[in-house]
Amino acid sequence: MIVITAAMPFETSWISSQLIRPRHAAVGKFTALQGRLCASNVLIFHLGAGKTNAAHGTTLLLENFSPTLILLIGCGGAYRRSGLIPGDLAVATEEIFGDEGVITPQGWRSTKYLKLPLLRKGDQIYYNTFPIDQKVLNKAQEILKRFKPGTGPFVTVSEVTGTQEKADEMENRFRGICENMEGASVAQLCTFYETPFLEIRGISNVVKRRNKKEWDLSAATRVSQKAAREIITHWRGAP
């Protein structure tokens, strides 16, 4: 089974309409939509906004199902140097917790500076960064060639960036291409449960001084859902 997750229902409305024989499925105290799509069993589940909701929802999914892939889709903001614009597609090579750490007189420092790992998995120690499995990423990039996606680090924040000064600070700190509010939590749980994970987002805006008149949520959700369908169509036999 492939699980498609997103924060909000509007981010999955089109792909939900594509399911064959859709039916409701219980996920803890919540409800998901289950059906067939492109010859694959698919479950669509909305996590809610933010890290806590994302971690809770992902844990429920991983405890109650055995996904062959968790695919996180939706909208994101592009950092300026990525070159991405609204309507473009972005694929995560890693997910980074952008807020976890400490502010010192010398500036921000990560959880590694604090010697506080976010996850220990065997001999692996994870601080702020959770890489996407390279085999999963390679397969996704091959499938999504026609979308010409931008690829690079995604940054997950609690406080959405809304000034140019903060945007420059975050971009310089992490060299990320896309900002969001859920991805790193999902990546951490998938790493813990050893479940393949992929995150693709449509760009709704460039991260700078906040001006929602410049946003294009429709274009962002459209491209991420089209790309998700492409992944599902060709994922059989993937790593």
Image (cartoon, grey):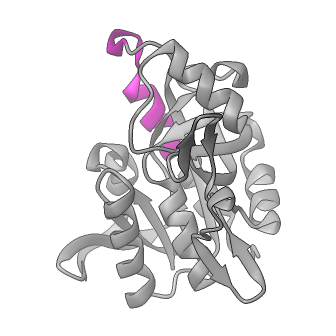
| Image coords of residue 173 (percent x, y) | 68, 34
| Image coords of residue 83 (percent x, y) | 71, 20
User: As displayed, is residue 8 above or below residue 61?
Assistant: above
User: As displayed, is residue 111 above or below residue 190?
Assistant: above
Which corner quadrant holds the C terminus? Answer: bottom right
Can the viewer see residue 11?
yes
- 213 in magenta: yes
The segment highlighted magenta reads: 211-225
Image-based side of 179 in relation to 48, left or right? right
**Nearest the eye: 12 or 64:** 64
**Nearest the eye: 225 or 81:** 81
How many discs mark residues in the rendered view? 0
Residue furthest front in the image = 105
The residue lying at 39 percent from left, 37 percent from top is: 159
The residue lying at 74 percent from left, 33 percent from top is: 148
Image-based side of 166 in relation to 137, left or right? left
**Nearest the eye: 141 or 127:** 127
Residue furthest left in the image = 29
The residue lying at 76 percent from left, 58 percent from top is: 137
Image-based side of 75 in relation to 175, left or right? left
| Image coords of residue 149 (percent x, y) | 71, 36
